[in-house]
Image (cartoon, coloured by chain):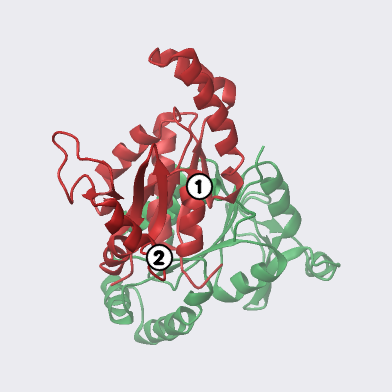
Chain colours: A red, B green
Amino acid sequence: MNEGILLVLSAPSGCGKTTILRQVMAELPSLAFSVSHTTRQPRPGEVNGRDYHFVSVEQFKAIRDSTPSGFLEWAEVHGNFYGTARQEVESRLAAGIDVILDIDVQGAEQVRRNAAPVTVFIAPPSLAELERRLRGRGTESEESLLRRLANAEKEMQAADSYTYLIVNDHLEQAILALKSVIIAERCRQRQIL
Amino acid sequence: MNEGILLVLSAPSGCGKTTILRQVMAELPSLAFSVSHTTRQPRPGEVNGRDYHFVSVEQFKAIRDSTPSGFLEWAEVHGNFYGTARQEVESRLAAGIDVILDIDVQGAEQVRRNAAPVTVFIAPPSLAELERRLRGRGTESEESLLRRLANAEKEMQAADSYTYLIVNDHLEQAILALKSVIIAERCRQRQIL
Protein backbone atom coordinates (compact mmCIF):
# COMPACT_ATOMS: atom_id res chain seq x y z
CA MET A 1 0.00 0.00 0.00
CA ASN A 2 1.21 3.50 -0.83
CA GLU A 3 1.65 5.99 1.96
CA GLY A 4 -0.97 8.73 2.07
CA ILE A 5 -0.26 12.31 1.09
CA LEU A 6 0.06 15.08 3.67
CA LEU A 7 -1.67 18.17 2.32
CA VAL A 8 -1.49 21.61 3.83
CA LEU A 9 -4.12 24.10 2.74
CA SER A 10 -3.90 27.81 3.55
CA ALA A 11 -5.92 30.79 2.42
CA PRO A 12 -6.73 34.26 3.67
CA SER A 13 -10.27 34.37 5.09
CA GLY A 14 -12.89 35.15 2.47
CA CYS A 15 -11.15 33.17 -0.28
CA GLY A 16 -13.67 30.34 -0.27
CA LYS A 17 -11.40 27.79 1.35
CA THR A 18 -14.10 26.22 3.51
CA THR A 19 -16.53 25.86 0.62
CA ILE A 20 -13.85 24.40 -1.65
CA LEU A 21 -12.59 21.98 0.98
CA ARG A 22 -16.07 20.77 1.94
CA GLN A 23 -16.88 19.97 -1.70
CA VAL A 24 -13.54 18.25 -2.39
CA MET A 25 -13.89 16.12 0.75
CA ALA A 26 -17.37 15.09 -0.39
CA GLU A 27 -15.97 14.03 -3.76
CA LEU A 28 -12.84 12.30 -2.38
CA PRO A 29 -13.96 10.27 0.62
CA SER A 30 -10.47 8.87 1.21
CA LEU A 31 -9.32 12.29 2.37
CA ALA A 32 -9.19 12.78 6.15
CA PHE A 33 -8.98 15.78 8.41
CA SER A 34 -6.51 15.61 11.25
CA VAL A 35 -8.08 16.08 14.68
CA SER A 36 -6.15 18.81 16.50
CA HIS A 37 -5.17 18.93 20.14
CA THR A 38 -6.30 21.95 22.15
CA THR A 39 -6.18 23.22 25.70
CA ARG A 40 -9.39 25.23 25.40
CA GLN A 41 -12.59 24.02 27.03
CA PRO A 42 -14.99 21.91 24.93
CA ARG A 43 -18.01 23.82 23.67
CA PRO A 44 -21.49 22.29 23.96
CA GLY A 45 -21.81 19.46 21.43
CA GLU A 46 -18.08 19.04 20.84
CA VAL A 47 -16.84 15.48 21.23
CA ASN A 48 -13.37 14.64 22.52
CA GLY A 49 -11.43 12.76 19.82
CA ARG A 50 -13.82 13.86 17.06
CA ASP A 51 -13.75 17.66 17.14
CA TYR A 52 -10.54 18.02 19.13
CA HIS A 53 -8.38 16.10 21.51
CA PHE A 54 -9.01 18.15 24.65
CA VAL A 55 -5.91 18.14 26.84
CA SER A 56 -4.52 20.07 29.80
CA VAL A 57 -1.81 22.69 29.37
CA GLU A 58 0.63 20.26 31.03
CA GLN A 59 -0.26 17.47 28.61
CA PHE A 60 0.03 19.86 25.66
CA LYS A 61 3.45 21.10 26.71
CA ALA A 62 4.70 17.54 27.29
CA ILE A 63 3.78 16.59 23.73
CA ARG A 64 5.15 19.83 22.34
CA ASP A 65 8.47 19.63 24.17
CA SER A 66 9.35 16.00 23.44
CA THR A 67 12.19 15.36 20.98
CA PRO A 68 11.34 15.44 18.16
CA SER A 69 8.33 17.59 18.96
CA GLY A 70 5.09 15.63 19.11
CA PHE A 71 3.43 18.43 17.12
CA LEU A 72 3.94 19.06 13.42
CA GLU A 73 2.77 22.58 14.16
CA TRP A 74 1.26 24.40 17.11
CA ALA A 75 0.15 27.89 18.03
CA GLU A 76 -1.20 29.86 20.93
CA VAL A 77 -4.38 31.78 20.12
CA HIS A 78 -6.14 33.97 22.70
CA GLY A 79 -4.37 32.13 25.52
CA ASN A 80 -5.25 28.62 24.30
CA PHE A 81 -2.90 26.15 22.64
CA TYR A 82 -3.73 24.33 19.43
CA GLY A 83 -1.56 21.72 17.73
CA THR A 84 -1.44 19.00 15.09
CA ALA A 85 -0.03 15.82 16.62
CA ARG A 86 2.66 14.11 14.59
CA GLN A 87 1.45 10.63 15.62
CA GLU A 88 -2.14 11.41 14.63
CA VAL A 89 -0.99 12.36 11.13
CA GLU A 90 1.72 9.75 10.61
CA SER A 91 -0.46 6.79 11.58
CA ARG A 92 -3.04 7.81 8.98
CA LEU A 93 -0.43 8.39 6.28
CA ALA A 94 1.07 4.97 7.03
CA ALA A 95 -2.39 3.44 6.55
CA GLY A 96 -2.54 5.03 3.07
CA ILE A 97 -4.99 7.75 4.10
CA ASP A 98 -4.42 11.24 2.71
CA VAL A 99 -4.51 13.85 5.47
CA ILE A 100 -5.34 17.50 4.97
CA LEU A 101 -4.37 20.26 7.41
CA ASP A 102 -6.25 23.54 7.22
CA ILE A 103 -3.74 25.94 8.75
CA ASP A 104 -2.35 29.42 8.33
CA VAL A 105 0.97 30.36 6.74
CA GLN A 106 2.89 30.19 10.02
CA GLY A 107 1.55 26.69 10.68
CA ALA A 108 2.39 25.66 7.13
CA GLU A 109 5.96 26.82 7.61
CA GLN A 110 6.24 24.71 10.78
CA VAL A 111 4.87 21.63 8.99
CA ARG A 112 7.43 22.11 6.20
CA ARG A 113 10.19 21.95 8.78
CA ASN A 114 8.79 18.78 10.38
CA ALA A 115 7.47 16.81 7.40
CA ALA A 116 7.31 16.84 3.60
CA PRO A 117 3.84 18.20 2.89
CA VAL A 118 2.25 19.10 -0.42
CA THR A 119 1.17 22.69 0.18
CA VAL A 120 -1.70 24.51 -1.51
CA PHE A 121 -2.46 28.21 -1.23
CA ILE A 122 -5.86 29.49 -2.27
CA ALA A 123 -5.77 33.14 -3.26
CA PRO A 124 -8.44 35.65 -4.23
CA PRO A 125 -8.21 37.06 -7.77
CA SER A 126 -7.08 40.32 -6.14
CA LEU A 127 -7.22 42.16 -2.82
CA ALA A 128 -9.88 44.46 -4.28
CA GLU A 129 -12.04 41.43 -5.14
CA LEU A 130 -11.46 39.98 -1.65
CA GLU A 131 -12.63 43.27 -0.11
CA ARG A 132 -15.71 43.20 -2.35
CA ARG A 133 -16.52 39.64 -1.19
CA LEU A 134 -15.98 40.37 2.50
CA ARG A 135 -18.17 43.49 2.28
CA GLY A 136 -20.75 41.43 0.38
CA ARG A 137 -21.11 39.08 3.36
CA GLY A 138 -22.30 42.02 5.39
CA THR A 139 -21.22 40.30 8.60
CA GLU A 140 -18.05 42.20 9.32
CA SER A 141 -17.49 45.38 11.25
CA GLU A 142 -15.28 47.88 9.43
CA GLU A 143 -12.50 47.21 11.92
CA SER A 144 -12.73 43.44 11.51
CA LEU A 145 -12.82 43.83 7.73
CA LEU A 146 -9.73 46.00 7.65
CA ARG A 147 -7.91 43.54 9.91
CA ARG A 148 -8.85 40.63 7.63
CA LEU A 149 -7.63 42.55 4.57
CA ALA A 150 -4.34 43.44 6.24
CA ASN A 151 -3.90 39.78 7.25
CA ALA A 152 -4.73 38.64 3.72
CA GLU A 153 -2.16 40.96 2.21
CA LYS A 154 0.46 39.63 4.62
CA GLU A 155 -0.45 35.97 4.05
CA MET A 156 -0.36 36.40 0.27
CA GLN A 157 3.32 37.32 0.55
CA ALA A 158 3.89 33.70 1.58
CA ALA A 159 2.00 32.25 -1.41
CA ASP A 160 5.19 31.75 -3.43
CA SER A 161 6.50 29.17 -0.99
CA TYR A 162 3.53 26.86 -1.59
CA THR A 163 3.72 23.93 -4.02
CA TYR A 164 0.44 24.91 -5.67
CA LEU A 165 -1.36 28.20 -6.09
CA ILE A 166 -5.08 28.09 -6.83
CA VAL A 167 -6.70 31.42 -7.65
CA ASN A 168 -10.35 31.23 -6.67
CA ASP A 169 -11.73 33.19 -9.58
CA HIS A 170 -14.49 30.71 -10.37
CA LEU A 171 -15.58 28.43 -7.53
CA GLU A 172 -16.20 25.35 -9.68
CA GLN A 173 -12.76 25.63 -11.24
CA ALA A 174 -11.10 26.09 -7.87
CA ILE A 175 -12.83 22.95 -6.56
CA LEU A 176 -11.73 21.02 -9.66
CA ALA A 177 -8.18 22.33 -9.23
CA LEU A 178 -7.87 21.21 -5.59
CA LYS A 179 -9.39 17.82 -6.42
CA SER A 180 -6.98 17.50 -9.35
CA VAL A 181 -3.99 18.34 -7.17
CA ILE A 182 -4.86 15.50 -4.80
CA ILE A 183 -5.49 12.95 -7.57
CA ALA A 184 -2.32 14.01 -9.42
CA GLU A 185 -0.17 13.87 -6.28
CA ARG A 186 -1.28 10.27 -5.79
CA CYS A 187 0.37 9.51 -9.16
CA ARG A 188 3.40 11.72 -8.62
CA GLN A 189 6.57 9.73 -8.04
CA ARG A 190 8.27 10.79 -4.80
CA GLN A 191 11.84 10.19 -5.89
CA ILE A 192 11.45 12.77 -8.66
CA LEU A 193 11.88 16.38 -7.65
CA MET B 1 -0.31 35.01 -19.59
CA ASN B 2 1.29 31.90 -18.11
CA GLU B 3 3.49 29.77 -20.31
CA GLY B 4 1.97 26.46 -21.36
CA ILE B 5 3.08 23.10 -19.97
CA LEU B 6 5.13 20.67 -22.01
CA LEU B 7 3.83 17.16 -21.34
CA VAL B 8 5.49 13.97 -22.45
CA LEU B 9 3.36 10.84 -22.44
CA SER B 10 4.83 7.36 -22.85
CA ALA B 11 3.33 3.91 -22.53
CA PRO B 12 4.03 0.42 -23.81
CA SER B 13 1.58 -0.47 -26.58
CA GLY B 14 -1.60 -2.04 -25.28
CA CYS B 15 -1.75 0.15 -22.16
CA GLY B 16 -4.66 2.24 -23.41
CA LYS B 17 -2.64 5.38 -24.04
CA THR B 18 -4.46 6.34 -27.24
CA THR B 19 -7.90 5.90 -25.67
CA ILE B 20 -6.90 7.85 -22.56
CA LEU B 21 -5.30 10.66 -24.55
CA ARG B 22 -8.23 11.02 -26.93
CA GLN B 23 -10.67 11.37 -24.05
CA VAL B 24 -8.48 13.82 -22.12
CA MET B 25 -8.00 16.00 -25.21
CA ALA B 26 -11.77 16.03 -25.73
CA GLU B 27 -12.25 17.23 -22.13
CA LEU B 28 -9.38 19.75 -22.15
CA PRO B 29 -9.60 21.62 -25.45
CA SER B 30 -6.66 23.87 -24.61
CA LEU B 31 -4.30 20.91 -24.98
CA ALA B 32 -2.46 20.71 -28.30
CA PHE B 33 -0.58 17.99 -30.08
CA SER B 34 2.73 18.94 -31.60
CA VAL B 35 2.92 18.32 -35.36
CA SER B 36 6.05 16.26 -36.05
CA HIS B 37 8.48 16.60 -38.91
CA THR B 38 9.09 13.51 -41.04
CA THR B 39 11.00 12.52 -44.14
CA ARG B 40 8.58 9.77 -45.11
CA GLN B 41 6.18 10.24 -48.00
CA PRO B 42 2.68 11.55 -47.22
CA ARG B 43 -0.01 8.88 -47.27
CA PRO B 44 -3.30 9.50 -49.08
CA GLY B 45 -5.35 12.02 -47.11
CA GLU B 46 -2.46 13.32 -45.01
CA VAL B 47 -2.10 17.09 -45.05
CA ASN B 48 1.25 18.84 -44.76
CA GLY B 49 1.32 20.98 -41.61
CA ARG B 50 -1.64 19.17 -40.07
CA ASP B 51 -0.60 15.50 -39.88
CA TYR B 52 3.12 16.09 -40.33
CA HIS B 53 5.55 18.63 -41.65
CA PHE B 54 6.82 16.68 -44.64
CA VAL B 55 10.45 17.57 -45.33
CA SER B 56 13.39 16.22 -47.31
CA VAL B 57 16.24 14.35 -45.64
CA GLU B 58 18.44 17.42 -46.25
CA GLN B 59 15.94 19.73 -44.57
CA PHE B 60 15.56 17.33 -41.65
CA LYS B 61 19.29 17.05 -41.09
CA ALA B 62 19.75 20.82 -41.30
CA ILE B 63 17.20 21.31 -38.49
CA ARG B 64 18.63 18.43 -36.48
CA ASP B 65 22.24 19.56 -36.74
CA SER B 66 21.79 23.24 -35.93
CA THR B 67 23.07 24.45 -32.55
CA PRO B 68 21.13 23.99 -30.34
CA SER B 69 19.39 21.22 -32.21
CA GLY B 70 16.15 22.29 -33.84
CA PHE B 71 14.56 19.06 -32.57
CA LEU B 72 13.62 18.36 -28.96
CA GLU B 73 13.80 14.70 -29.93
CA TRP B 74 14.17 12.74 -33.14
CA ALA B 75 14.47 9.13 -34.25
CA GLU B 76 15.01 7.07 -37.36
CA VAL B 77 12.37 4.38 -37.86
CA HIS B 78 12.47 1.98 -40.82
CA GLY B 79 14.75 4.34 -42.74
CA ASN B 80 12.60 7.45 -42.19
CA PHE B 81 13.32 10.33 -39.82
CA TYR B 82 10.78 11.69 -37.35
CA GLY B 83 11.30 14.65 -35.06
CA THR B 84 9.61 17.16 -32.76
CA ALA B 85 10.68 20.66 -33.73
CA ARG B 86 11.72 22.89 -30.86
CA GLN B 87 10.24 25.99 -32.50
CA GLU B 88 6.88 24.28 -33.07
CA VAL B 89 6.66 23.46 -29.36
CA GLU B 90 8.15 26.63 -27.90
CA SER B 91 5.90 28.98 -29.86
CA ARG B 92 2.82 27.21 -28.52
CA LEU B 93 4.10 27.15 -24.96
CA ALA B 94 4.87 30.87 -25.21
CA ALA B 95 1.27 31.44 -26.32
CA GLY B 96 0.06 29.70 -23.15
CA ILE B 97 -0.93 26.50 -24.96
CA ASP B 98 -0.15 23.18 -23.25
CA VAL B 99 1.60 20.82 -25.64
CA ILE B 100 1.58 17.04 -25.34
CA LEU B 101 4.14 14.77 -26.98
CA ASP B 102 3.23 11.11 -27.42
CA ILE B 103 6.68 9.50 -27.61
CA ASP B 104 8.59 6.48 -26.43
CA VAL B 105 11.05 6.31 -23.54
CA GLN B 106 14.07 7.15 -25.72
CA GLY B 107 12.28 10.22 -27.08
CA ALA B 108 11.27 11.24 -23.56
CA GLU B 109 14.88 11.04 -22.43
CA GLN B 110 15.92 13.33 -25.31
CA VAL B 111 13.19 15.86 -24.41
CA ARG B 112 14.37 15.88 -20.78
CA ARG B 113 17.83 16.88 -21.99
CA ASN B 114 16.48 19.68 -24.19
CA ALA B 115 13.59 21.08 -22.15
CA ALA B 116 11.85 20.79 -18.77
CA PRO B 117 8.88 18.56 -19.53
CA VAL B 118 6.33 17.09 -17.16
CA THR B 119 6.53 13.40 -17.95
CA VAL B 120 3.78 10.81 -17.54
CA PHE B 121 4.17 7.07 -17.90
CA ILE B 122 1.08 4.90 -18.35
CA ALA B 123 1.67 1.35 -17.20
CA PRO B 124 -0.45 -1.80 -17.32
CA PRO B 125 -1.36 -3.33 -13.93
CA SER B 126 1.13 -6.11 -14.76
CA LEU B 127 2.85 -7.70 -17.73
CA ALA B 128 0.48 -10.68 -17.41
CA GLU B 129 -2.49 -8.33 -17.71
CA LEU B 130 -0.88 -6.59 -20.69
CA GLU B 131 -0.43 -9.98 -22.42
CA ARG B 132 -4.07 -10.81 -21.72
CA ARG B 133 -5.18 -7.50 -23.28
CA LEU B 134 -2.97 -7.86 -26.34
CA ARG B 135 -4.20 -11.44 -26.91
CA GLY B 136 -7.75 -10.22 -26.40
CA ARG B 137 -7.37 -7.85 -29.35
CA GLY B 138 -6.83 -10.90 -31.56
CA THR B 139 -4.98 -8.75 -34.09
CA GLU B 140 -1.41 -9.74 -33.29
CA SER B 141 0.69 -12.60 -34.63
CA GLU B 142 2.47 -14.57 -31.90
CA GLU B 143 5.77 -13.06 -33.01
CA SER B 144 4.45 -9.50 -32.93
CA LEU B 145 2.85 -10.11 -29.55
CA LEU B 146 6.06 -11.43 -28.03
CA ARG B 147 7.98 -8.46 -29.46
CA ARG B 148 5.47 -6.03 -27.93
CA LEU B 149 5.71 -7.75 -24.54
CA ALA B 150 9.52 -7.69 -24.62
CA ASN B 151 9.40 -3.98 -25.54
CA ALA B 152 6.90 -3.30 -22.77
CA GLU B 153 9.10 -4.97 -20.18
CA LYS B 154 12.05 -2.90 -21.34
CA GLU B 155 10.10 0.38 -21.40
CA MET B 156 8.69 -0.24 -17.93
CA GLN B 157 12.21 -0.18 -16.56
CA ALA B 158 12.26 3.53 -17.46
CA ALA B 159 9.00 4.27 -15.64
CA ASP B 160 10.78 5.43 -12.49
CA SER B 161 12.30 8.39 -14.29
CA TYR B 162 8.87 9.85 -15.13
CA THR B 163 7.30 12.58 -13.01
CA TYR B 164 3.99 10.73 -12.84
CA LEU B 165 3.07 7.06 -13.05
CA ILE B 166 -0.51 6.19 -13.96
CA VAL B 167 -1.42 2.52 -13.70
CA ASN B 168 -4.25 1.85 -16.15
CA ASP B 169 -6.20 -0.57 -14.01
CA HIS B 170 -9.56 1.10 -14.60
CA LEU B 171 -9.88 3.18 -17.75
CA GLU B 172 -12.11 5.88 -16.25
CA GLN B 173 -9.71 6.38 -13.35
CA ALA B 174 -6.71 6.56 -15.68
CA ILE B 175 -8.46 9.22 -17.77
CA LEU B 176 -9.29 11.18 -14.61
CA ALA B 177 -5.68 10.84 -13.42
CA LEU B 178 -4.16 12.22 -16.64
CA LYS B 179 -6.68 15.06 -16.73
CA SER B 180 -5.91 15.81 -13.07
CA VAL B 181 -2.17 15.87 -13.74
CA ILE B 182 -2.65 18.52 -16.41
CA ILE B 183 -5.01 20.67 -14.31
CA ALA B 184 -2.76 20.34 -11.24
CA GLU B 185 0.39 21.20 -13.19
CA ARG B 186 -1.27 24.43 -14.31
CA CYS B 187 -1.44 25.40 -10.61
CA ARG B 188 1.98 24.05 -9.68
CA GLN B 189 4.49 26.78 -8.98
CA ARG B 190 7.59 26.37 -11.12
CA GLN B 191 10.11 27.74 -8.64
CA ILE B 192 9.23 24.96 -6.19
CA LEU B 193 10.97 21.65 -6.77
Check whether the beta carbons of the residues at disc 2 and disc 1 lie within 8 A of each other: no
Q: Quadrant of residue A87?
A: bottom left
Residue depicted at 52% across the width and 48% down the height = A164
The x, y position of residue B147, in whole percent, is 43, 85
Could you tell me how many numbered marks the image carries?
2
Residue depicted at 63% across the width and 47% down the height = B4
Chain designation of label 1: A
Disc 1 marks a residue whose amino acid type is Gln
Q: Quadrant of residue B177?
A: bottom left
Where is the N terminus of chain B found, in terms of image quarters?
Answer: top right
Disc 2 marks a residue whose amino acid type is Ser
Give B84 or A102, whichever is nearer the viewer. Answer: A102
The x, y position of residue B129, in whole percent, is 28, 76
State whether residue A58 is above or below residue A47: below
Using the image, tell me which numbered label, if any, was put on residue A106.
1
Q: Report the residue marked by disc 2.
A: A69
